[in-house]
Amino acid sequence: MQWAARIEDLRKDYVLKSETVHALRGVSFDVPRGDYVAIMGPSGSGKSTLLNLLGCLDRPTSGRLLLGDDDVAQLDDDSLSHIRASRIGFIFQSYNLIPQLTVLENIEVPLYYQGRITRDDKRRCEELATMVGLGDRLQHRPAQLSGGQQQRVAIARSLINDPYFLLADEATGNLDTVTTEEILSIFERLNQEGRTIIMVTHEDEVAAVAKRTIRLRDGHIQSDERQR
Ligand code: ADP
Ligand code: MG
C-alpha cells in the first residue's frame, strides 16, 4: 500500500433547517505514505470538516475516501469506529487527556477498544513515553504536567496503534514558541521514520516545517504545493 489516503471529489454538506452548508465542494488529493501535510485556510474554509472525514469521525456526503484499501464512505458505523480506534492517531489543540489517569494509562487508552492489554502493550506504552521524553514521568497525572508535556503524552497515545497517519488539529495552538518547536521536532522525527502526518494550522511558521501545504478556501482546494 503506497497511499496513506486517497480522496476523490469529496463533498460534505451540512443540512440545516433553513439552509444547506456546502462545507467541502469537491476536494481531491492523494497522501502518499510518509507525507507531511499542512492544511491551511481561513476560518470556515472546511479544514476541520476535512480532518474529521480523514479521521472517520464523520461521513462524506459524496465522493471517495480511501484509507489503505478501505473506502471509508462505504463502511457501516461499526467498521468506521473500528478504523478510527485502531488506525487513526489524533492530536488535538486541547490535548484531550483523561485527568484521572497517569501518563502511562493515558497512552494505553486506545488499546481499551481492542480488548485485553498485554505485557507487550505495557512495554510499548513505556517505550513511547520515553520516545517523547517522558520516561521519568510515567506515574504523573495531566495536571502535574506542563502543556508541552501533556501534548507529548497525546502524541505517544496517538502512536500506540501504529496508525495510518497522525491527524493534528492546531496541535501547537496553545503552546509557546519554544514548546511549539519541541513538538514540531518530534513530528519531524516521526515523519523521518516514515510516519504520515496531516496537520491543520493557521501559523505560517508551523506550516513551513511540513513537506506540503494544502490551502482551502470556501470548501475548495485553492493551492496544493510542495515546499522547496
Ligand atoms: P474551518 O475548520 O476551516 O474553520 P469548518 O470545517 O469547521 O471550517 O467549517 C466549514 C463550514 O461548515 C463553515 O461554514 C461551518 O459553519 C460549517 N459547519 C461546520 N460544522 C458544521 C456542522 N456540524 N453543522 C453545520 N454546519 C457546520
Ligand atoms: Mg476548524
Image: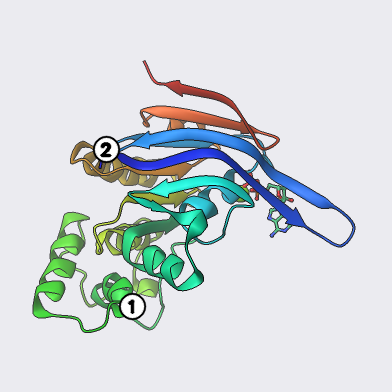
| 15 relative to 168 in the view: left or right | right
Q: Which mark is residue 142?
A: none
Q: Which mark is residue 113?
A: 1
The residue sitting at 58% across, 43% down in the picture is: 47
Of callouts 2 and 1, the N-terminal one: 2
Of 206 and 117, nearer the camera is 117
Give how far apart the Cα atoms at labels 2 and 1 are. Answer: 27 Å
Inspect this view and state whether residue 102 appears: no
Residue 157 location in percent, x, y? 30, 64
Q: How many residues crowd around disc 1 within 10 Å: few (fewer than 14), some, or many (20 or more)?
A: few
The residue sitting at 25% across, 42% down in the picture is: 1
Of 92 and 205, nearer the camera is 92
The residue sitting at 43% across, 50% down in the picture is: 168
Residue indicated by mark 2: 2
- Looking at the image, is 73 positioned above or below residue 157? above
Query: Which amino acid is tagged 2?
Result: Gln
Quadrant showing the C terminus: top left
